[in-house]
Amino acid sequence: MQSNGYNQLLHRFCIAMSVLTGGLLTAGALVTSNDAGLSIPDWPLAYGSMVPPFVGGIRYEFTHRVIAGIVASLTVVLAIWLWRVESRRWVRMFGWVALGTVIAQAVLGGMTVIFRQPIPVSVAHACVAQIFFCSIVSLALFTSRWWQQDLKLTGDSGSPQVRTLAILTAGVTFLQLLLGAVFRHKGSGIVPHLIGAAVVLGMVIWTAAALRNRFPNSGAYKFCRVLLHSLVGVQIMLGAAAWWSRIATRDYPQPMPSMVALTVAHVVFGALTLAGTILVALITHRVLIAAPRAAMASEHAQGVA
């Protein structure tokens, strides 16, 4: 039975799923950073059993698989829940898209093991993980009370429009994470990743400046500005620290804890940064109207008056 309006329990479930998916990304980053990707050589079993010996790199890879299984199972629950209670058809379909994404992620994870970590498959596995995380975070926003209430829409007569800037910022951030995944899986050097970081920083500054200059008194847009600046600022510092740790420990025979911790934090904050840019793009889409529509609405109001 579908119902209209805010469903607090469903919204909280989406938030919990977002947190758990962040934990899954952390577990995956621990696998890569500890060079434990092939510590379990078979899939879907582990050394031919359900529970392998919990030693060495096996503990990272097996923990990653267990969390992935839990997330996939809960995504099935979420998709069915949305289908049964959500009145907005596009949100129901979004739930099924999230489910399809997590299934694709599981298949890519299995292919990574079976084919011994080919770079294209490993990179695709990393990128689809980011997409799935953002889809769950988006559902948390779509099911929130704020999104479903009647909001005052604001016209944007600037050029380029903030909605366009926000979408471009999210797009270049995703490309930057793709370049980071290629670098982490030894498919390229650091230079493309650094160039991508500079482009993302430039887009964030541009988008935030447009929000500040055009809507200086808006609480929602202030939240967007603070979110963008905070996430990108922390991410850049973590990236510099992670790169320094790699250089400082490159002669060690195995990954050192400092390098692992900084690299994992950099990867996870990369996912948070992408999710943040997606949220900003969605928020601007929700509360802004295009300039032509704003002009038409103004002319209509004047005609009525």
Image (spheres, rainbow, N blue to C red):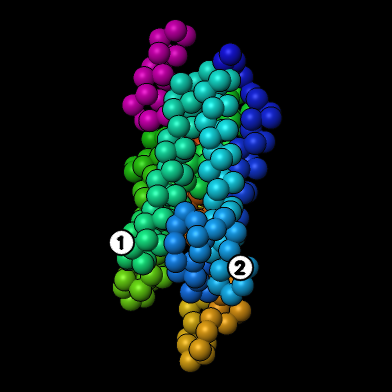
**Disc 2 residue type?**
Pro
Residue annotated with mark 1:
120
Could you tell me which residue is drawn at 58 percent across and 26 percent down? 81
Query: Disc 2 on helix, strand or loop?
Result: loop
Q: Distance between the residues labelled 1 and 2?
A: 30 Å
Could you tell me which residue is drawn at 37 percent across and 61 percent down? 114
Query: Taking 223 as reference, is 148 above or below it?
Result: above
User: In front here: 275 or 44?
Assistant: 44
Region in magenta: 289-305
User: Where residue 137 sits in the image (x, y, percent)?
Assistant: 54, 42
Could you tell me which residue is drawn at 30 percent across and 61 percent down? 120
**Disc 1 residue type?**
Pro
In the image: residue 42, left or right of residue 142: left
In the image: residue 14, left or right of residue 305: right
User: In front here: 218 or 166?
Assistant: 166
Query: Which quadrant of the figure contains the N terminus?
Result: top right
Residue annotated with mark 2:
53
What residue occupies the far top of the structure in this picture?
304
Query: Taking 35 as reference, is 69 above or below it?
Result: above
Could you tell me which residue is drawn at 54 percent across and 51 percent down? 68
